Image (spheres, rainbow, N blue to C red):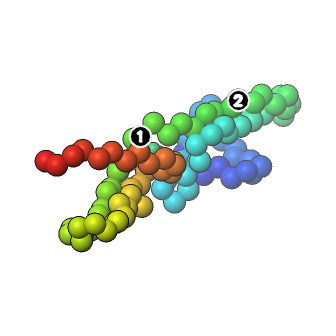
Amino acid sequence: MAEFRINQDVATDAPTVEVSVTPATPLAPGRHSFRLVVTDDSGNNSQPDEVVVIVADTSAPTAVLTAPRVVDAGKSFVLDGSRSFDVGGGKVVRYVWTYLGQP
Ligand SMILES: [Ca+2]
């Protein structure tokens, strides 16, 4: 388990390492590159190998719709979706509003 920072080496004796991601240190959705150089027991270093990991936001956002409880007849009013939010590192970028008639 290790906190990775850009261009800061993390050395381990073990052949695997966990990339620690917490809400305080997230990896933004998108492509992230990692590099590995290994050293043998004679001190020889390998050529680097690199991979690209795609961090994907697969969690649905939550819609929160607020509106005035009562409005004057004949007056315009505002529907507010600004309290909607997303988890998984994404953000809400589109709002689709639908009038459902009189319940
Ligand atoms: Ca999301």
Residue at the extreme left of the image, as rendered: 103
Residue at the extreme front of the image, as rendered: 74
Above or below 17: residue 3: below
Counting from the top left corner in percent of width and height, residue 2 is at 59, 48
Look at mark 1 in the image and give the residue it sits on. Answer: 59
Could one spot residue 17 in this view of the protein? no
Disc 1 marks a residue whose amino acid type is Ser
Could one spot residue 92 in this view of the protein? yes
Disc 2 marks a residue whose amino acid type is Val
Counting from the top left corner in percent of width and height, residue 44 is at 86, 30
Count of numbered circles on the image: 2
Look at mark 2 in the image and give the residue it sits on. Answer: 51
From the viewer's perspective, tell me whether residue 30 is left or right of residue 73.
right
Please name the residue shown 77% across and 28% down the image. 49
Q: Nearer the viewer, residue 63 or 14?
A: 63
Residue 65, located in which quarter of the rendered image?
Answer: bottom left
